[in-house]
Image: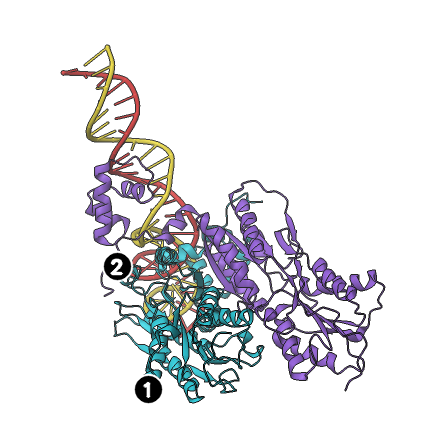
Chain colours: A cyan, B purple, C yellow, D red
DNA sequence: TATTAAAATGTAAACGTTTAGATTCATTGA
DNA sequence: TCAATGAATCTAAACGTTTACATTTTAATA
């Protein structure tokens, strides 16, 4: 099967009794080739089953028309949605996307960046697993355009497309407060990430604006995962005085939280109110339906590619652009006042 | 910023007063270089910020260490899970994965395949959007190893890793029958796909084995999407005689179906039983919890890469291997007999 | 028909590696 | 001290394109 090696432009040229330059011209249809000659060449290509070798081409042209997308967790439904947005725009402009998943590992992320640089991608869109890492150095050195998506990259002047996490968390917390809650817990993500810190900041700001004192016990932390949300909720449940409302910082954590509520028989909507960051599939299946802070994933992806593309095309340098997109509060049922009013002693 | 072009192996060689061959040797640490020389070279690399050009390397070596993964729907949570399995194995063996999403478009799929071939990937794992398409021709011609995952590829002898869809659907239907149901509806996917056909076949077989006559009205079809499941459920709901149980062929369809049940106030577990194909996030949040046919996504991905890798390394051809993995029936609550026993006239 | 401009095609040098095979260098034993 | 050996290093030719520039062919004009 794999006998003779693949035909090259040389073979096509010979077969069509023409020079390689002419073949190249028709492959890239640059015109200036007699119709009859072209026909002969096209025929030869068909006959030999010739496929242009993009590796050789990239080498000569010094562009690959590939952009790398690096995400931290492909199993978090947020990212596929963002990726769709990027892909869609990229395809329109003739770029091909290479998607890689770091599983939140800075080591893997670093490896992937190196590979992408070696491979000569024209640009990178990244949601980093390590905002303070040194792994971006190489991108900067090589002058490869980068757009930071959803998570800030510190100490480098890349373009960024972020969500206004502070505002989102503020809105959510404010909503709970306006519904009459005073004992509002937050399930925080890692403080090593922008979203982790900012969502906490928004929570603090709302409390402060409405003159509700911070209760340290109501601040629990975990990783951005189902497990993180689950165990955080357990912790809250074991408090002497339990909160009457929970704000969860992340979609996966929300799932863990709701699971925990069920397992602990801590009744959502009756004993405890809830708002989560990010809309999730289950939000409309629980009873009551979950109120959430919803991010515009598709817009996020589209904008990210647009910025990247502009950089790729530009030949002069210009200062970084930083976009902050506002999330939208979707009020459903889980944050209503209901009959939750007083603190409940543990049963 | 992007002033002088990137340093090459030449520059490093000059800077370390050594030939490019020696530099190449240390880059690929092949040994046979005096320690002192190596140190000088490493130093030069650091100083110049040299990065090996993988494009040039691939061109010379005629291997890219990249494998392409083509999936039809990145927003279907089934695929990210499978992809994780592939990625994990690939990374272990030093391969880099390029993930592409066709959004179920045969045209896009065809484009992507061509791009991957041009880019010279060492192999491809694909869940095709068009089982009968001609887009695989080029892969075969070029002798690029291919593994078909989850969906069969007809008329080509590629390795395959499939799920025993017939068995899965059979088990589900059988379970419903054993729970006492006779009027069992199926929400089918497109018959143009293996899963679509096979799941229907499994359903038919179970009915036939238990001597339950097929009622055409209970067979509704749609696309593998939330919308497909939703409208199919609507159709069922409008029947003169409604089914007492529904088997849904696909995770997204299940979501649509459950949403429809809610909207139509067709009470799950009371008026209608349910089993879905594929475990989904919401399954444990509904009341009652959903029984499902669960596929081993991770195993699927791992096995697919393993087969691909074997082919990449092999130099002789050997006949295709076809694996059929069995799904597992997870019985929760939604298929219990409950108090559903008789056909209900429309209210 | 001879001249000329324009169009079509060809030549050859790059792009940045890897790698046979050739060459040089250091080390050892006689 | 000198071969002989083995280790270290170098030279140069690929790999398959693109493209500036040179050359040839064609068509148009006088």
Asked if marks 1 and 2 touch (Cβ < 8 Å), the reply is no
Residue A89 coordinates in the image, percent (x, y): 45, 73
Which picture quadrant has residue B194? bottom right
Residue located beneath label 1 in the image: A211
Q: Is residue A36 visible?
A: no
- Residue at the spot 61% in from the left edge and 69% down from the top edge: B283
Which picture quadrant has residue D27? bottom left
- Mark 1 to mark 2 CA distance (whole Å): 58 Å
Give the SS element for disc 2.
loop
Q: Is residue A218 visible?
A: yes
Residue located beneath label 2 in the image: B5
> Is there one chain holding both mark 1 and mark 2?
no
Mark 1, Cα crowd under 10 Å, few <14 / some 14-19 / many 20+, is few
Judge by depth and name the residue closer to the eye, B68 or A77: A77
Left or right? Give the position of B70 relative to B48: right
Judge by depth and name the residue closer to the eye, B218 or B173: B173
Residue A86 coordinates in the image, percent (x, y): 44, 71
Residue B315 coordinates in the image, percent (x, y): 54, 41
């Amino acid at each position: 099967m794999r006998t003779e090696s693949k035909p090259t432009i040389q073979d096509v040229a010979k077969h069509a009794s023409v020079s390689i330059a002419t073949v190249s011209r028709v492959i890239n249809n640059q015109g200036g080739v007699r119709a009859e000659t072209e026909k002969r060449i096209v025929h030869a290509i068909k006959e030999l089953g010739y496929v242009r070798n993009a590796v050789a081409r990239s080498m000569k042209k010094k562009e690959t028309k590939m952009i790398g997308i690096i995400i931290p967790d492909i199993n978090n439904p947020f990212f596929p949605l963002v990726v769709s947005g990027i892909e869609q725009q990229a395809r329109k402009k003739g770029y091909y996307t290479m998607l890689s998943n770091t599983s939140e590992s800075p080591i893997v992320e670093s490896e992937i960046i190196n590979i992408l640089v070696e491979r000569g991608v024209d640009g990178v869109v990244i949601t980093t697993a390590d905002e303070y890492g040194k792994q971006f150095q190489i991108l900067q050195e090589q002058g490869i355009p980068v757009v930071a998506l959803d998570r800030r990259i510190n100490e480098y002047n890349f373009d960024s497309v972020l969500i206004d996490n502070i505002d989102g968390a503020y809105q959510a917390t404010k909503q709970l407060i306006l519904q009459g809650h005073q004992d509002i817990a937050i399930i925080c993500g890692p403080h090593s990430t922008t979203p982790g810190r900012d969502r906490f900041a928004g929570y603090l700001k709302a409390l402060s604006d409405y003159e509700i004192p911070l209760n340290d016990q109501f601040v629990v932390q975990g990783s951005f995962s189902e497990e993180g949300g689950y165990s955080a909720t357990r912790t809250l449940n074991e408090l002497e005085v339990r909160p009457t409302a929970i704000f969860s910082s992340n979609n996966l954590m929300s799932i863990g939280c709701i699971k925990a509520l069920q397992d602990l028989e801590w009744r959502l909507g009756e004993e405890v109110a809830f708002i989560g960051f990010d809309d999730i599939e289950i939000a409309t299946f629980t009873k009551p339906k979950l109120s959430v802070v919803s991010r515009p994933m598709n817009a996020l992806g589209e904008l990210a590619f647009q910025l990247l593309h502009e950089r790729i095309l530009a030949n002069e340098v210009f200062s970084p652009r930083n976009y902050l997109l506002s999330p939208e509060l979707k009020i459903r049922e889980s944050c209503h006042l209901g009959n939750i009013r007083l603190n409940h002693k543990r049963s």
